[in-house]
Image: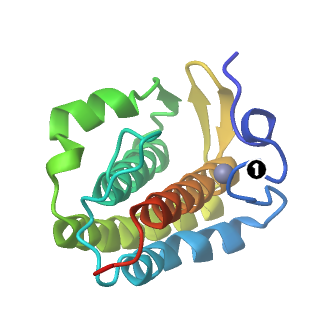
Amino acid sequence: MEKWGASLYGNPCGGCGFEWSLTPEEAIRIVEGLPAHGRGLLAGRTGYERHPDLGWTPAAYLSHITDNLRNWAERLAGARLSGAVDVPGYDPDLMAEGRNYNEIAMAAALWSLERAADAWAESVTAALAAGVVLRHATRGAQRAEDVARNNAHDGHHHLWDIERILRCAGQPGS
Ligand SMILES: [Zn+2]
């Protein structure tokens, strides 16, 4: 069985400090706040900054958050609307390669993230109300609230990565 959530990252997360005990409603608020949070962090930046230990640009991390939200929102919708609860794995690195994440413009990545966060919140809210439980190929049962916490952590964690990249890249104009 694949490790996920608090057993993979620690509680709180050893990197970004995310607390896994939060409610699904709090997780939804975190995801709804990601676009504005990302936009604030990246004010005055290009989005193409790099960190020597990280393979992606800030805009690439935003694109990853977006695709992750899209993927899970779609899965929850599939289970709720058609009973398709069995879901396979998902390879974010292949996704990054296929979409050339590091070449995506920051404004485009933010535009996509705003829409993905809205659609995700709608799908997760409906899935929570319907009591959706996915059967993941390698993680086992994933309740809608597990998905909400996992996806909120993903966004929180990668905004922390973006902060690390920007700290490493120095102040704009300096
Ligand atoms: Zn984290």
Q: Is mark 1 within 8 Å of ligand 1?
A: yes
Q: Position of residue 146 (x, y in %)?
A: 69, 48
Q: Position of residue 51 (x, y in %)?
A: 41, 49
Quadrant into which the N terminus falls: top right
In the image, taking residue 162 as reference, residue 151 lies left or right, namely right
Quadrant into which the C terminus falls: bottom left
Identify the residue at image location x=73%, y=59%: 18
Residue 69's quadrant in the figure? bottom left
* Vertical placement of residue 86 versus 51, above or below: above
**Which color scheme is applied?**
rainbow
Most foreground residue, 149 or 10: 10
Q: Residues within 10 Å of mark 1 (few under 14, many from 20)?
A: some
**What residue is disc 1 on?**
13
Residue type, numbered disc 1: Cys
Identify the residue at image location x=82%, y=54%: 12
Identify the residue at image location x=42%, y=69%: 170
In the image, taking residue 82 as reference, residue 80 lies left or right, namely right
